[in-house]
Amino acid sequence: MARALEQLTAFLTEQAERARQGAGQGAANNQEEIYHGLDKFLKRSPPKFEGGYNPDGAYEWVRELERIFETLVCAEPRKVAFASYLLSSEARTWWTSVRGRITPEEGELIWEIFKNSFLEKYFPADAKGRKEMEFFELKQEAMSVGEYAAKFEELCQFHPRYSTANDETSKCVKFEYGLRPDIRTVVGHDQIRNFATLVKKCRIFEENEKT
């Protein structure tokens, strides 16, 4: 606990100094808001990130932070400040070196800029490519329908065509293609083009087959 308080004090001191060097009272007010929100953020037990080659860990770190940001309704300056507070070891060294280069001229570093820079470093193109290939090759095989659907949704996010509401048909067709032949034969006749409905029907068929 003592160590955590020391780190928090150091972080707030650093942010205060940056505020004093920034755009006057407006910057100081932004930092004041950040201070009041940090304790609420930390109560959600956000994970730290140390760096190194861990593409899956890096991507999940970003996703977990975004889930917390959504529940707290965080403003942009808070997101970057809170995320950077969680960086340690090699990742902290990376952030110290890159922060000045990615900050816009107007002075406010938004979450999307931070996230894109972070993922470029820790979730490189080759890692994303492997996830895309894993998605295209995904088959149900020995998995249950629930397990297959969960894996499908996890990998679907790496291919925009299948992760938007505008192309539900393609998503359903791709899901059907990976099903075991016995399930695919049954649900294929109905040409279901709502993903949630398709998964539900597959589960019902699977459960009925077990009885």
Image (spheres, helix red, strand yellow):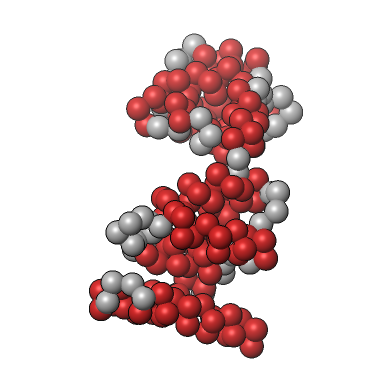
* Residue 131 % position (x, y): 62, 33
Which residue is at 58% across, 85% downward? Answer: 5
Of the pair 152 and 7, the residue shown nearer to us: 7
* Residue 28 % position (x, y): 31, 78
The relative height of residue 73 versus residue 160 in the rendered view (above or below) is below
Which residue is at 62% across, 63% downward? Answer: 93
Where is residue 145, by image quadrant? top right
Where is residue 128, by image quadrant? top right
* Residue 203 % position (x, y): 57, 31
Which residue is at 67% across, 61% downward? Answer: 90
Of the pair 186 and 191, the residue shown nearer to us: 191
Q: Is residue 82 left or right of residue 121?
A: left
Of the pair 26 and 49, the residue shown nearer to us: 26
Of the pair 28 and 141, the residue shown nearer to us: 28
Which residue is at 48% across, 51% downward? Answer: 115
Q: Is residue 167 left or right of residue 26?
A: right
Is residue 33 something that shows in the picture? no
* Residue 9 % position (x, y): 52, 84
- Identity of the residue furthest to the left in this view: 25
